[in-house]
Amino acid sequence: MPFRDVDVNEQGHMIIGGCDAVELARTYGTPLYVLDEDRVRQACRAYRDAFSRYYPRGLAVYAGKALLTTGVCRIVAQEGMGLDVVSGGELYTALAAGFPPDRIYFHGNNKSVDELRLALSEGVGRIVVDNLGELELLEALAREQGRTADILLRITPGVEAHTHTYIRTGQLDSKFGIPIAGGQGLAAARRAAESARLRLVGYHCHIGSQIFDLSSYEAAIVLMMEFLAEAQRATGVAAKELDLGGGLGIRYTAEDRPPTPEELVRRIADVVRQEAARHGIAAPALALEPGRSIVGEAGVTLYTIGFVKRIPGVRTYAAVDGGMADNPRVALYQARYEAVVANKANQPRLETVTIAGKSCESGDVLIRDLEVPPLESGDVLAVLSTGAYNYSMASNYNRFPRPAMVLVSRGRHDLLVARETYADLIRHDRIPRWLEEPAGEVAEAAG
């Protein structure tokens, strides 16, 4: 059974945001990303309310890399959150949506000159400096534009969260951030504090993703607050802000038991106050950067079942019209999902199948050993908790057009992203001039 109850109408169809999932599939086609607006807003408010209750000088900053479209930017802005972007493209999307620049935090371990110029010219609220080279470049560009930029230094505290190797970022051996170890963090703090064009507002860290154990956050806070005290003594500049990154996990399967945003904020608030008192420094304003925990469980992906292949005594494969091109997380991280047959949502699960994607890869398998009602070609499969890092990481592998995305709310539905067409696939293709002759004539000339 799925990890959560699903709403079912009189036809036995799954309901998402008040909309019949089967009708959504018929209207927009499949594969189809579906995002429940009310779930997104509830998640935003859970963080906002938790900060209001436990640490009023706190801000939730949505991590746009989880899912970013102009429509999603509008929702996040309306909910009073900040926005974390990690590229010029994400920044451009936010600005195009009218997101307030002063609430944008710009991340990235290798920001280009053009990206930094754009961030400076648009008045981005915080530029999170990832390394000493970037610090020097940003100062030069700020001087060139006659501007002063507010920055956070990204510090690597040396904490390893218990997550997949590819989504750990807080340990010493990481491409992200400036290590505390060896005095590098203090050296960067001194350099930033001396700058006439950069205002050192505070510090940032991020320890990983899909985190369930809050002790990882506590360990990072202890190290970061000690660093804040050392940096204040070394530079004379008190940190006004501490950004603890994101990473709170969500439910993908019945075994997952993530903490709530309230539990996370309460725990970190207690430890920050405790450590500030211990070191004799003022408690800084706090920021968190939730992404997956805002949109992950709000998303569902709809597929149409194609061929069902039964290998007696071995396995039954049910192939869908999508796969690793629209959800690479299974292949990348061995991610696990649960699913519901949307047009048979109230029928008993009598069969065990493996859901295969249509990419030309043996490893394109979305779910193994899923219990379902007896499947037929044309059934609609709804894979749960696909709101985060599915659309964001989708590709055109095998020249599949990327799916559409719809927003649903209280029975309403409309497009967030239009489906790509075959024409879109070749829109940026070019044929060099020496290849412009018809293929047959080239072959004859070669012969």
Image: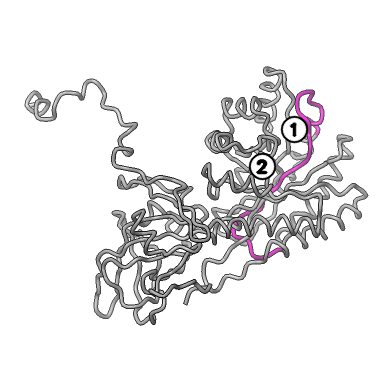
Give percent across and percent down for residue 415.
44, 48
Give percent across and percent down for residue 220.
74, 54
Which residue does the image show at 67% across and 33% down from the upper left? 124
Q: Which mark is residue 164?
A: none
In this picture, residue 317 sits left or right of residue 90: left
> How many labels, in total?
2
Residue holding disc 1 = 150
46 shown above or below 64: below
Mark 2 surroundings within 10 Å by alpha-carbon count, few (fewer than 14), some (14 through 19), many (20 or more)? many
From this viewpoint, which residue is outermost toward the right?
280
Mark 1 surroundings within 10 Å by alpha-carbon count, few (fewer than 14), some (14 through 19), many (20 or more)? some
Dividing the picture into quadrants, the one containing residue 399 is top left
Q: Which mark is residue 177?
A: 2
222 shown above or below 86: below
Query: Looking at this view, is 256 or 53 the one in front?
Result: 53
Which residue does the image show at 69% across and 22% down from the upper left? 142
Residue 300 seen in the figure: yes
Residue 171 seen in the figure: no
- Label 2 – label 1 distance at C-alpha: 17 Å
Of tags 2 and 1, the one toward the viewer is 1
Query: Looking at this view, is 247 or 85 the one in front?
Result: 85
Judge whether residue 210 is colored magenta. Answer: yes
Dividing the picture into quadrants, the one containing residue 100 is top right
Counting residues from the start of the chain, the first of labels 2 and 1 encountered is 1
Give percent across and percent down for residue 288.
70, 51
Quarter placement of the C terminus? top left
In this picture, residue 65 sits left or right of residue 189: left
In this picture, residue 217 sits left or right of residue 444: right
State which region is magenta: 190-214
Tag 1 secondary structure: strand
Residue type beneath disc 1: Asp
Residue type beneath disc 2: Gly
